[in-house]
Amino acid sequence: MAKQGVCRVSELSVPVPWGEIRGQVWGPDGGHPVLCLHGWADNCGSFNTLIPLLPKECRYVAVDLSGHGLSSHLPPGVFYSYTEYAADIYRVVDALQLKKFSIIGHSMGGDIAGLFTALYPEMVDALVLLDAFGFLPTDPTEIPKVLRQGFDQLLQFENNTEEKKRVYTYERAVGRLLAANHSLSEQSVHILFERGLVQVEGGFVFSRDLRVNFKNIARLTVEQSLEMQSRIQASVLAVLADGGSDRIFSEPAQSKFTSMLLQCLRDRNHRVVTVPGDHHVHLNKPEVVAPFVSDFLRTKALSPSTSHKL
């Protein structure tokens, strides 16, 4: 698919009580706003290859979630959770004075987008889930265990006064991320490292907060997830990777639960498509994903009656 001329416009910085949320803004000033939310341990560079293939009439606001990329880390003693991230999204759209917009979310970003859209259904007209389901339910019998794991991880981290960021050569950092995340191509790693590495004396450190690796303690059961999903008024497109989705399941019941979520999306006449590729197909091979997302945005968000300004 040929590029349509969307160009990077500016670096975004939104003040928050503990620092700033950073990101990048692409497209014309008056374009229909589309918020882009990356996945766990990634950053807004996750959309660098996809956005140029999407409709040029849109203005894409790609953010580094708190603790990721160039955004500030949360204060000491605070948990990273989907609810915290969703509150951050409200802070961003409020600062930008967005009243109606679309959201594209990959993986964890898709689940944050689903939660936000359920809580503020009047604000979102179109929701794109990239290898995500909008929610990731937890079996109620597992919740005490994952809560304790999250508590223990944070408390042990706080008690480790010797904790320091490890310094890498650039090549070793590339190797580490490729080894940890097999769905990333080497070129995609270089793209993410534009915001994911910080140069220091002796080499590079990862910019993300180590606490983002800990268990998310904000959990929903499948019943709560389905209730939240029912409150979404936006049109929804779910683009699943045939070799990717299962990598996000850390608990046995999640595959069954997400099948229920997808069936409910279909029952509500939302669109679910599967594309060849892995979990980061939108970054590695954006031309596979872009036609579906472009058609959806044109149909569901861009129309003569649409007039949403940044």
Image (spheres, helix red, strand yellow):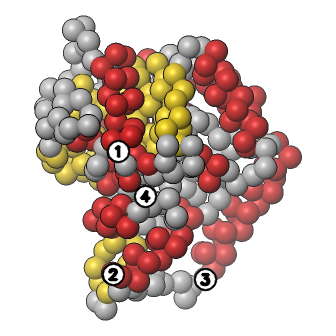
Residue named by callout 4:
42
* Contact flag, marks 2 and 4 (Cβ < 8 Å): no
Q: Which badge, 3 or 1, is on the more N-terminal residue?
A: 3
Q: Position of residue 10 (x, y in %)?
A: 15, 48
At 39% from the left edge and 38% from the top edge, which residue is drawn?
289
The answer for how far apart the CA atoms under marks 3 and 1 are is: 41 Å
Q: Secondary structure at mark 1?
A: helix
Q: Position of residue 254 (x, y in %)?
A: 73, 43
Residue named by callout 2:
170
- Which is nearer the eye, 176 or 134? 176
Q: Is residue 119 visible?
A: no
Q: Which badge, 1 or 4, is on the more N-terminal residue?
A: 4
* Contact flag, marks 3 and 1 (Cβ < 8 Å): no
Residue named by callout 3:
160
Q: Which badge, 4 or 3, is on the more N-terminal residue?
A: 4
- Which is nearer the eye, 162 or 6? 6
The answer for how far apart the CA atoms under marks 1 and 2 are is: 25 Å
Mark on residue 165? none
Which amino acid type is shown beneath numbered disc 4? Asp
